[in-house]
Amino acid sequence: MKKPHWVVEKERARKAAAAETLWLFGLHAVRDALDNPARDKLRLVATRNAADRLADAIAASGLTPEIADARRFPAPLDPGSVHQGAALEVRPLDWGGLADRCGPARPGASPARAVLLDRVSDPHNVGAILRSAEVFGARAVIAPRRHSAPETGALAKTASGALERQPYLRVTNLAQAITELQGMGYTVLGLDGDAPDRLEDAVAGTDGGPVALVLGAEGPGLRARTRAVCDRLVRIGHAGEFGSLNVSNAAAVALYATRQGNDGSR
């Protein structure tokens, strides 16, 4: 019996994902990946100096590095990548599904927080957001599979290790992910500089419940469909006439504000 087209396409996508690899580079990113038991590590290329600096992590990983000349570094990296003499081929991390990472908290745990990114495609911005999400205890950073930054060496380097520890979930449909979070009890707040309500006030109104923050790409902002499914649109308060922040800075400020709101501080 011939398989339905959707089944065939799903199997192809699964096989393609299983075969996908990426190269991480830079001493910090490579060390954190070597130390991560959940990371499937395939090939390590390093200069003698870098291998010496990573000796403990290499020994623990069980990998045998390929010692390379820094002037003829063989890893297939983009020109200009600051590899610091170390590059590691890995498979993308599997963080599971939305319910696995953002489901109900255990009794006594801090209120759940999540960050959703609507077509934020710059890997440096996403890497910085992952760092902030880790610092402020977000359950996950969630982005659509299309039109968003994938796991790359540049993203990992900017994340400065957070990519190995902070769940980064890629979903098929961001609006559906928002609806799923709402079904788990999250209040979903879309950030919009022109919104009448302040983020701090909206968080205070959640009584310490789960909050998800949605940020759009710089310039276009949130798409119409994304805006429509958010519970509220809110803005970050600012002192002067100019109130625009880089998306990664906005994410850090917003995450901090949700923590302050939970603490009762204004």
Image (cartoon, rainbow, N blue to C red):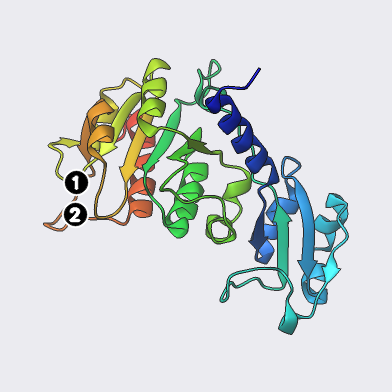
User: Is residue 263 visible from the viewing direction of this image?
Assistant: no
Q: Residues within 10 Å of mark 2 (few under 14, many from 20)?
A: few
In the image, residue 145 sits, relative to residue 157, either above or below, namely above
Query: Which residue in the rendered view is the most extreme toward the front?
Result: 1
Residue at (36%, 22%) from the top-left corner?
Answer: 179
Depth check, front residue: 190 or 41: 41
Residues at badges 1 and 2 in contact (C-beta under 8 Å)? Answer: yes
Query: Which residue in the rendered view is the most extreme toward the bottom?
Result: 71
In the image, residue 158 sits, relative to residue 234, either above or below, namely below
Residue 89 screen position, x and y as percent: 72, 57
Q: Which mark is residue 29?
A: none
Depth check, front residue: 172 or 169: 172
Q: Which mark is residue 193?
A: 1
In space, the residues marked 1 and 2 are separated at their CA atoms by: 7 Å
Q: Which residue is mark 2?
A: 243
Tell whether 198 sits left or right of 72.
left
Q: Which amino acid does the dot numbered 2 rest on?
A: Gly
SS at circle 2: loop
Residue at (27%, 55%) from the top-left corner?
Answer: 245
Q: Residues within 10 Å of mark 1 (few under 14, many from 20)?
A: some
